[in-house]
Amino acid sequence: MAKMHIVFVASEAAPLAKTGGLADVAGSLPHALKRLGHEVIVIMPYYRKQIRASSVKIRPLKHSIPMRIDGVDRKASLHEARVDGLRFILIEQDDFYDREELYGPSGGAYKDNLLRYIFFNRVALEAACLLERPVDIFHCHDWQTGFMPLLLQTQYQHQPRIANAQCVFTIHNLAYQGVFPSFWLHRLGLPAESFHPGGFEFYGQINCMKAGVFAADRITTVSQAYAREILTPEYGCHLESFLSEHAGKLSGIVNGLDVENWNPATDTAIAANYAPGNMRGKQACKIALQKKFGLTCDAEAPLLTIISRLAEQKGVDLLLDCAPAWLEQGYQLAVLGPGEPAYEAMMKRLAKKRPAQMHFYAGFNEELARKIYAGGDIFLMPSRFEPCGLGQLMSMRYGNVPVVRATGGLKDTVTSHATSKRASTGFGFEQAKPAVFHAAVDFAVETWHKPTAWQRIVGRAMRRDSSWDASAGSYIKLYEAIVD
């Protein structure tokens, strides 16, 4: 098929602004699509503070877009950034986007988030009308862009540059749906005719995720297993029936990884480089991490690692239930991640009791995360649900063997040693119970004490193709199926 013009619209994208995996996808997948010969542009808000910190050069564009919203006349200036040849268009509105955090303070949300992102959706559509070529595909991500497909159908369908565009809407995490009071409906000029249970109404409120599912031409999630799971009451977050009505346009495509960026053979943040077949640097990374965190420098102690938001979804309560016993058994723990204050406090107390065995860093630091991936032996992801997950992909890339709950993308990407010793790339467990998780980790440690078997698992994990290439090809097939 001829080269397509694809516009990604996302509320965050690496390396410009990031809070989680959405940014990694919106920053990496477009590069893979470009390598397949297509024209790709990313549109996102101009988060001045975060983008300044990224050190990416920004230049103003000559265009600005007038927009009246919530009774206020505004003008959105447009800016441009280029990252390895990928073009980003940034929408400036400082009172909306120049804030300390992208979506709200830790554990909370800004009260005007619907106003902020409806403004973003509308200006993104207007900006797309100014592009040199008509748009073939809008690829929208999560609730922050949920109204784009519906606005395109109902209020922007006469704009010639975008009128024939098809919309793909990706659900990265169904738990975050963007639910807001109905008083915004008329204040923001939303399509009232679609405010009903079969549209974007949700128990009398506005649901942005429902808007995207309702109006998009295709819906994707970030793994095949998660696409099945969200149709069930356990994982559907009260939308399982609604999603089942749209199951004919739903599919799962597993996320990839920027394997050039996440590469222990070239990573300058780690103590020593290494690769399959030349693993001497891996032990040096473990010793360096133990020293950095004040842990006992002991090659015979298994070093368990966790890089995660400290939230119930991530199974942090399971970890806290098991950790004291693991420390009694002589295991070491390195934990990195921000999260709920109660979980942070418990982690700090545990680490304070056993400073030679456990270190906790409250927050996120990418350079430190790389050191943990490289220095650890076993990586823990006991998530109650995990749409895709990137931590397990990064840990496998660095030979830090994952122990994961068999759910969502974890199930799709990690082959458990319990089910296939010849193909295993990690360890899995089914039930989200402390005893089951504890047994899986003990099994992994038992295998770690068998160097030959362990090195085979490490080698398979590091050689696993976690690149975006296969996933990008699946997205192209999906795009082609809906473009005339």
Image (spheres, grey):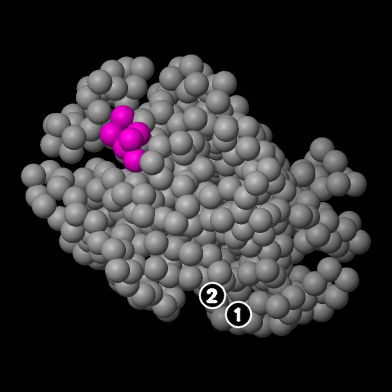
Residue located beneath label 2 in the image: 367
Q: Give the Cα separation between the discs numbered 2 and 1.
A: 6 Å
The secondary structure type at the circle numbered 2 is helix
Q: Is residue 305 above or below residue 203?
A: below
Say whether residue 137 is left or right of residue 449.
left
**Residue at image x 27%, y 54%?**
104
**Residue at image x 77%, y 44%?**
415
- Give the number of the disc on residue 269: 1
The secondary structure type at the circle numbered 1 is loop
- Position of the N terminus by quadrant: top right
How would you classify the magenta stretch by its main secondary structure? loop
- Disc 1 marks a residue whose amino acid type is Ala
Say whether residue 89 is left or right of residue 228.
left
The foreground one among 37 and 46 is 37
Do callouts 2 and 1 mark residues in contact (Cβ within 8 Å)?
A: yes
**Residue 208 seen in the current view:** no
Residue range of the region highlighted in magenta in the rendering: 154-159
At label 2, counting other C-alpha atoms closer than 10 Å, the crowd grade (few under 14, some 14-19, many 20 or more) is few
Say whether residue 192 is left or right of residue 380.
left
Please check the rendered image and state whether residue 157 is part of the magenta-colored stretch, yes or no.
yes
Please check the rendered image and state whether residue 201 is part of the magenta-colored stretch, yes or no.
no
Q: Is residue 399 above or below residue 103?
A: below
**Residue at image x 91%, y 61%?**
452
Q: Is residue 199 above or below residue 319?
A: above
**Residue 221 seen in the current view:** yes
- Position of the C terminus by quadrant: top right
**Residue at image x 37%, y 70%?**
51
- Disc 2 marks a residue whose amino acid type is Glu
Residue 285: x %, y % from top left: 69, 78
